[in-house]
Image (cartoon, grey):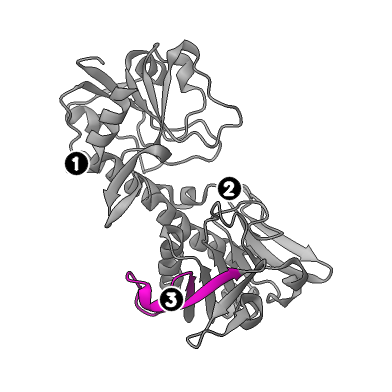
Amino acid sequence: MKEKYYLGFISQSHMVNEMRSPIWHKHLPVYTPDHPVIKEYIFEQSFGSHTFKGAADNQLKQLGYKVKSRLELLSLCDIVISLKPTDEWKYMQPNSTLVGWFNHLNHPLNESRNINFLDLENIRIFDDGRYQKLLYKNAYVAGRCGVSQTLDKLSEFEPSSPAITQRKLAVVLGYGNIGKGAARELLRQGIEKVIVFTQRPPTEVSDKLDLIEYRQMQYSNDDIYEISDQGLKQPLIDCILREADIIVNAKIPSNDCPKWRFVPENKFFQLKSNMAFIDPIHRKGHGADFVEVTSFGEPLKKICKATHSIWFNGCNSMPNYQADYASYVISEALLKNFDTIVEAAAKK
């Protein structure tokens, strides 16, 4: 373990359509990163220019930070934070540590040149009453952006969709961070009625949002049921999903139940014609048989079966739809938990 480290922040990933930055420069005077083992902080040139209205290089220099080219930064720093690395490790010095998300890569990371990889998904913090991922609020952002992106796009080229013209009922399936973000955005968009389904009885949901109705769902015999207050069971597609103008799948699969089927294949025709099915989870086959990953460039896909169709959004980079907002959330989490990140990286 070194006594002092150079730490660098890469501004923009080379991943297509990745627009987020790890740091919002206006956070720095508030959450000044400081750690006894960090010798110097270095930021990539044109920092934040792709996310915000302009580069923050001058502001960073005024705050006492160094600004260097991408290759200079990578060759100099012992610890590098890059949200979605693509090839940064090729230019880093041996025994240095790269911090970021890596699940977007199609090939396994090798240990060539003795580069250490610290996945942001594996860093845990205690926040909001429990231990969870360092960037758990990014899931909340995905829920909000998925709803916003879908309704904005539909209003452009399918304004006759009931998600645009009626907006009477939206159903959110699951109430983790994704579900909370989606529910809040649905309220902001003026949806008349928002129902959230959880596996817990409504009386056990402690962090409820005002103006939202909470109900219980249960997985049984390869189908999903609504459980009434009297304990009666009815398939979700029959009792409520068929009425929805918007459905958001926010239920993360588990080892016990890797695939929930909210819309059985033989009941696709019960969904409202041209309604919107939003899926920030976008795991093939989970939620419905038609679930797949869609691109940021074309997030919405029309799913047609015979003469019946709906609109589906399974975009795998929903937070980039509001990259500035997503970056604020990431920046605050990274800077508030800076010591945790540095200590984890220094141990590598």
* In this rendering, the label closer to the viewer, 1 or 2: 1
Give the residue at x 26% y 29%.
343
Badge 1: few (under 14), some or many (20 or more) residues near its Cα, within 10 Å? some
Residue 167 spot, x, y in % from top left: 54, 78
Q: Earlier in the sequence, mark 2 or mark 3?
A: 3
Among the 4 quarters of the image, the one containing residue 238: bottom right
What range of the chain is rendered magenta? Answer: 196-219
Which residue lies under the disc numbered 2?
A: 296
Frontmost of labels 2 and 3 is 3
Describe the element under mark 3 as helix, strand or loop. loop
Q: Secondary structure at mark 2?
A: loop
- Classify mark 2: residues with Cα within 10 Å, few (<14), some (14-19) or many (20+): many
- Residue at x 37% of width, y 43% of height: 52
Given the current orientation, which residue lies at the most extreme bottom position?
230
> Does residue 37 lie above or below 194 as drawn?
above
Q: Is residue 134 left or right of residue 292?
A: left
The label number, if any, that marks residue 31 in the structure image? 1
- In magenta segment, residue 212: yes
In front here: 170 or 126? 126
Q: Secondary structure at mark 1?
A: loop
Q: What distance separates the C-alpha of mark 1 from that of mark 3?
A: 39 Å
Identify which residue, 242 or 219, lies in the foreground. Answer: 219
Q: Give residue 201's mark.
A: 3
Say if the magenta span includes residue 317.
Answer: no
Nearer-N-terminus badge (1/2): 1
Residue drawn at x 36%, y 17% is 96
Q: Is residue 313 above or below residue 334?
A: below
When the figure is inspected, residue 39 is found, relative to residue 173, above or below; the finding is above
